[in-house]
Amino acid sequence: MTREKLIKFWDYYGTVCILLVIVVLFGALSPTYFLQSDNIVQIFVQSSITILTALGEFFAILIAGIDLSIGSIVALAGILTAKLMVAGMDPLLSVLIGGVLVGIVLGAFNGMLVNYTGLHPFIITLGTNAIFRGVTMIISGANPVFGLPFSFIDGLGGNIWIFPAPVVLALSMAVILWFITTNTRVGRNIYALGGNRESAYFSGVDIKLHTLIVFMISGLCAGLAGVLTTARLGAAEPTAGISFETYAIASAIIGGTSFFGGKGRIPSVVVGGLIIGTISNGLNLLKIQTFYQLVVMGSLIIAAVALDRMIARAR
């Protein structure tokens, strides 16, 4: 295989190869439990929230930015959705307002700050991460919200026919966003913006509009992840979503999204989320403590970015 073909192969199938290697590794280390059908389903369910947040982070990274506020949006959306339901609002309407609408509004807030201050998204979302978390604590009184309707918990925490609802929601969102990136002008413009901001501007791309759209998508995905987290836990935790941005960034980068913008694919991000979920599940089965998992995730981010630069130089 020539060098060019090898690089092209890695671009399309490298993430899948990594996932297969990890599955084989954990299958060998924990043959009794890891490859059981129930555990495989559990990996998909656990990965669904990571995939959702990674899909939003993918768009932020695609324009050579980042969104560090998604963990706080997860918590705030979960708390507001839960409070609306406890107050007597219909669960579906609560999800649409507390999860979907709030996520979009918070994302739009990030986008507007980026546009009108001219600061890098790292600085803006680092600040709004603290703001959103503080608002979450104020609204909740730093206490969990209990007493959620069974229809909500069973509906989003259970199954749709024979498929887990979190998996269906995450994959449905992935399909919608994949269609946007591959078949719409907005998607092409976002790639152009990430590839070369100045060229995109002179080609007629509205930089501020597409930056706003990117952060609204990120906020929407984080809001949905907050709803799913609340349904799975059966309560809304004000501390939910801590370190979610780390897992989301890791999923997107491992999935081949370039930290320097303009390069990445939705299917690979989904596989990246599965890799994170598989590693977490495997380490838990091996009874390895949580803080070691953070070491693994951080190492994976560094390795993935270094590999991206190596491949770029090879081209």
Image (spheres, grey):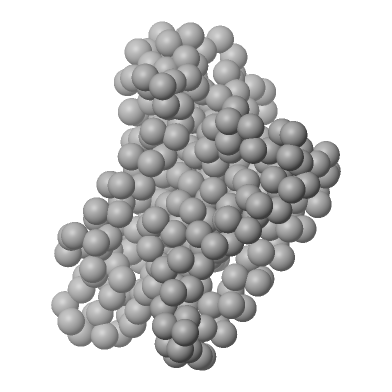
- Can residue 195 be seen? yes
Quadrant position of residue 95: top left
Quadrant position of residue 237: top right
Image coords of residue 244 (percent x, y): 60, 47
Left or right position of 26 against 109: right
Q: Residue at x 47, y 81 (%)?
A: 6
Q: Residue at x 53, y 50 (%)?
A: 273
Left or right position of 309 against 303: left
Image coords of residue 52 (percent x, y): 45, 44
Image coords of residue 179 (percent x, y): 24, 53
Q: Nearer the viewer, residue 162 or 248?
A: 162
Q: Nearer the viewer, residue 299 or 100?
A: 299
Left or right position of 70 against 165: right
Q: Quadrant of the C terminus?
A: bottom left
Relative to 84, does residue 289 appear above or below in the rendering? Answer: below
Q: Residue at x 33, y 64 (%)?
A: 211
Q: Residue at x 50, y 59 (%)?
A: 16
Relative to 120, does residue 203 appear above or below in the rendering? Answer: below
Q: Nearer the viewer, residue 252 or 44?
A: 44
- Can residue 127 be seen? no
